[in-house]
Image (tube, rainbow, N blue to C red):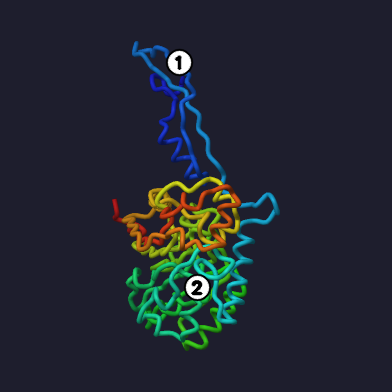
Amino acid sequence: RTEQHDRWLGFHRDDVEGWLRDAGFQETEIRDAEESCCSTSSCGEEAAIDVFLATARRPPETDHRTGESTRSRVRARYAEAARQTTTGEPSGCGRGSSTPSKLAPGRELYGSMGHEVPAEVTASSLGCANPVALAELRPGEDVLDLGSGGGLDVLLSARRVAPGGTAYGLDMTEEMLELARRHQAKAGVENVEFLRGTLEEIPLPDQSVDVVLSNCVINLSPDKPRALREAHRILRPGGRLAVADIVTTGELPPGLRRRQELWTACIAGAVEIDEYRRLLRSAGFLGVEIEVVRSLSIEDLGAPGRKLLTEEGIEPDSVDGLLASALIRARKPVDDDA
């Protein structure tokens, strides 16, 4: 009050909500405390001050029932998916008896593009759309795929950035990296490098790639603001972000986000479309575009998904249509951007 003289040190509600979200909190709520006060400034103007309460929830990075982190559960789930791929039974963000959601297999998502690599590579896709087509890659560009899994998007990208460009794949699961390297050898693609690491700590220097891809992985991150800031960091000025991901078109029931099984199935960690747009802008991206390409029905959750919802006391029909796969595009500003 003394420093600001005639300007009250209060906060706008929208600012508080934005600060909480930028800090990584979810389910923010601003409500009246049914209290107020008023005073007179030195200029003689009346100043009315409302008192409000702000509440929010930290994302469930840790499952307190088992002490196991979300990241550890995701890693274990995708290690299993890599092993199942070798037996012809891929599962993950989309398929398999232990995964609630069901999305289109790789051959449907990629069309004729999927024939550029061995059939087993396309069949191993655990994605929800085709970010390679969205990226519009050009020869000589360097590209990074976040959460590269079996390597499909990396191998398809490598063919498009040759000659002169390199396609990197980042994954935190050793089993997936081994699978991707086997797929690389079978595809005979050389301008590829697979890296081990997390979305929140990408092992590449600043401004090292022209394009960042991701396919149904950012929703798995327990710290999405940090993951998006990392993507922004490694992009060169004017670089492009091309992402396929699961989003929500409305507020999910709170109990749903508590189930780690639904987090590893790309459901509990999904972000509402407007919130996704805000996170991208907060990370520094411009030109954000989000296009829903498929709305998921209750049938897409499958029997395991409906069972998990029922165990949380959630009526399965209450989430019908709230989840969707989307294509997300954005760019990093160049130096002369306003």
Percent position (x, y) of residue 325? 41, 62
Element assignment for label 1: strand
Q: How many marks?
A: 2
Mark 2 Cα within 10 Å, few/some/many (few <14, many 20+)? many
Q: Are marks 1 and 2 in contact (CB under 8 Å)?
A: no
Closest to the observer: 2 or 229? 229
Closest to the observer: 220 or 266? 266
User: Is residue 20 shown above or below 106?
Assistant: above
In which image quadrant can residue 182 be found? bottom right
Left or right: 62 in relation to 90: right
Percent position (x, y) of residue 194? 53, 75
Q: Amino acid at mark 1?
A: Cys
Closest to the observer: 252 or 79? 252
Residue furthest right in the image: 66
Mark 1 Cα within 10 Å, few/some/many (few <14, many 20+)? few
Percent position (x, y) of residue 318? 46, 49
Element assignment for label 2: strand
- Rendered residue at 41%/73% (across/down): 142
Percent position (x, y) of residue 147? 51, 68
Left or right: 335 in relation to 214: left
The Cα atoms of the two marked residues, 1 and 2, are separated by 57 Å
Q: Earlier in the sequence, mark 1 or mark 2?
A: 1
Residue beneath disc 2: 169
- Rendered residue at 37%/55% (across/down): 285
- Rendered residue at 53%/45% (across/down): 254
Left or right: 174 in relation to 119: right
Q: Amino acid at mark 2?
A: Gly
- Rendered residue at 39%/71% (across/down): 130
Closest to the observer: 85 or 255? 255
Residue beneath disc 1: 37
